[in-house]
């Protein structure tokens, strides 16, 4: 039994150790990317990239049609930074960028902070949204 275990561990030991180190590196990279809410794929692009900043982009409220409540969002506008290849960034229009806050949850509390979601055209990624959360106040009369 012991020679079988030794063979399992020691046969191709350096290849197994390299595979374990590579798996750990991949896990570490993905974990950091998830925590920082970034995509490591955009940084691997060989094409030159550019960034564009849109200020005072209005926040759109997305709510269920069945909800008859009135919401107030503060602040009403945000600043969005997008990144992509140069031709795409240069041809981008402000109307193509959408900033939304999802309020379709029926259990939404009276006063809460909600994360802002950015929808950008294909080929663009959002780098930053400032602020990344908005204060949502539900009108108590509804």
Image (cartoon, helix red, strand yellow):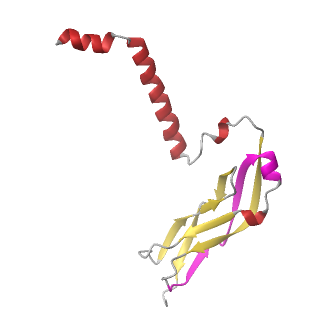
Q: Is residue 116 left or right of residue 67?
A: right
Q: Position of residue 106 (x, y in %)?
A: 43, 76
| Residue at the extreme bottom | 141
Q: Is residue 13 left or right of residue 79?
A: left
Image-quadrant location for residue 132: bottom right
Q: Which residues are magenta?
A: 68-90
Query: In the figure, 12 relative to 129: above or below?
Result: above
Q: Nearer the viewer, residue 46 or 127?
A: 46
Query: In the figure, 40 relative to 112: above or below?
Result: above
**Residue 110 in sight from this viewpoint:** yes
Residue at 51% from the left image edge and 73% from the top image edge: 103
Q: Is residue 130 left or right of residue 95?
A: left
Residue at 51% from the left image edge and 45% from the top image edge: 34
Image-quadrant location for residue 98: bottom right
**Residue 75 in sight from this viewpoint:** no
| Residue at the extreme left | 1
Q: Is residue 58 left or right of residue 17?
A: right
Residue at 45% from the left image edge and 72% from the top image edge: 105
Query: Which quadrant of the rendered structure holds the N terminus?
Result: top left
């Amino acid at each position: 039994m012991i020679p079988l275990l030794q063979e399992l561990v020691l046969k191709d030991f350096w290849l197994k150790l390299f595979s374990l180190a590579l798996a750990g590196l991949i896990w570490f990279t993905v974990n950091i990317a998830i925590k920082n809410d970034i995509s490591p794929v955009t940084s691997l692009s060989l094409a030159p990239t550019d960034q564009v900043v849109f200020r005072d982009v209005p926040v759109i409220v997305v709510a269920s049609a069945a909800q008859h409540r009135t919401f107030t969002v503060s602040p009403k506008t945000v600043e969005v930074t997008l990144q992509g290849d140069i031709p795409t960034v240069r041809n981008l229009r402000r109307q193509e960028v959408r900033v939304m806050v999802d309020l379709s949850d029926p259990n939404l509390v009276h006063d809460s902070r909600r994360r802002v979601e950015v929808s950008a055209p294909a080929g663009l990624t959002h780098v930053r949204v400032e602020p990344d959360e908005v204060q949502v106040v539900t009108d108590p009369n509804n």
